[in-house]
Amino acid sequence: MKDSSSRKKYIQKSIQVTSTNIEEEKKLITVEQSRPIVNALKKIKELLKYYFNILYLHNSMCINIYYNVYLNKFFL
């Protein structure tokens, strides 16, 4: 009798462990599936940052050239 009750407890514990492992694996799968989206968003963010840095540099160069030409033309 003791043997069968301990066996039942062991089986119940193993079922609980298995069910928690399955739940954890489901969570891991959803995290892995969402990761490519996050990685793509990070790459887009980096590209936009790079683009706006280039745009800022281009605009500042154009402004500098314009002011240099303006100053040279009228004041020198």
Image (cartoon, rainbow, N blue to C red):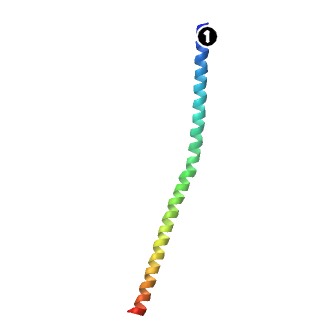
Give the residue displayed 48% in from the left and 76% down from the top: 59
At which x and y percent is residue 63? Answer: 46, 80
Residue reaching furthest to the left: 76
Q: Which residue is mark 1?
A: 4
On-image quarter of the C terminus: bottom left
The quadrant in which residue 61 appears is: bottom left
Q: Residue at x 60, y 37 (%)?
A: 26
The correct choice, above or below, for 20 with respect to 39 in the image is above
Residue toward you, 33 or 63: 63
Quadrant of image for the N terminus: top right
Give coordinates of residue 34: x percent, y percent: 58, 47
Image: 11 above or below 40: above
Give coordinates of residue 48: x percent, y percent.
Answer: 52, 63
Please report the residue visible at 48 percent of the width from the left and 72 percent of the height from the top. Answer: 56
Q: Secondary structure at mark 1?
A: helix
Q: Position of residue 15 (x, y in %)?
A: 61, 23
The extreme front residue here reads 75
In the displayed structure, would residue 57 be above or below residue 22? below
Q: Nearer the viewer, residue 25 or 72?
A: 72
* Type of the residue with mark 1: Ser
| Residue pictured at 57% horizontal, 43% vertical | 31
Relative placement, left or right, of 27 versus 52 is right
Does residue 2 sit above or below 66 in this rendering?
above
Specify few, some or many for label 1: CA neighbours under 10 Å numbering under 14, 14-19, or 20 or more. Answer: few
